[in-house]
Image (spheres, rainbow, N blue to C red):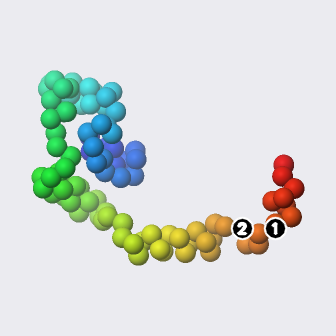
Amino acid sequence: MTLKFLEQEGRLPEFVEEIPSAAIEYVADLVKVPAAEFAKCAFTGRTAEYHRKQIREALGFRPCTRADEEGLISWLAAEVRPVKLAEALLLQGP
């Protein structure tokens, strides 16, 4: 379920409440376990951290760093923002 969440959301869940109940019920049915048992899963603590680490390593991911954030900001500023801000166009409105 955690892997599917990563695929859909682009990150790992931090709280059990983030997982849609329909997904919990579906997986619970597949493994023949009551869906209520999933609520007992811990998403904090050493075991949860270890599981997230295993998933990241298996898939070649790593947590974002401040350097990653700064690189993204630089890229957005250089590649995505308008080349020249036209104040007159902004003041005109639609």
Mark 1 vs mark 2, foreground winner is 1
Residue 31 in view of the camera: no
Q: Is residue 93 above or below residue 85?
A: above
Residue 84 in view of the camera: yes
Q: Residue at x 26, y 31 (%)?
A: 24
Q: Residues within 10 Å of mark 2 (few under 14, many from 20)?
A: few
| Disc 2: which residue | 82
- What is the secondary structure assignment of the residue under circle 1? loop
Q: Residue at x 32, y 64 (%)?
A: 63
- What is the secondary structure assignment of the residue under circle 2? loop
Q: Nearer the viewer, residue 56 or 72?
A: 72
Residue 81 is situated, as x and y percent measured from the top left of the image, at 66, 67
Q: Residue at x 81, y 59 (%)?
A: 90
Residue 10 is situated, as x and y percent measured from the top left of the image, at 39, 52
Report the side of 7 relative to 49 (left or right). right
Q: Nearer the viewer, residue 7 or 37?
A: 37
Q: Nearer the viewer, residue 88 or 41?
A: 88
| Disc 1: which residue | 86
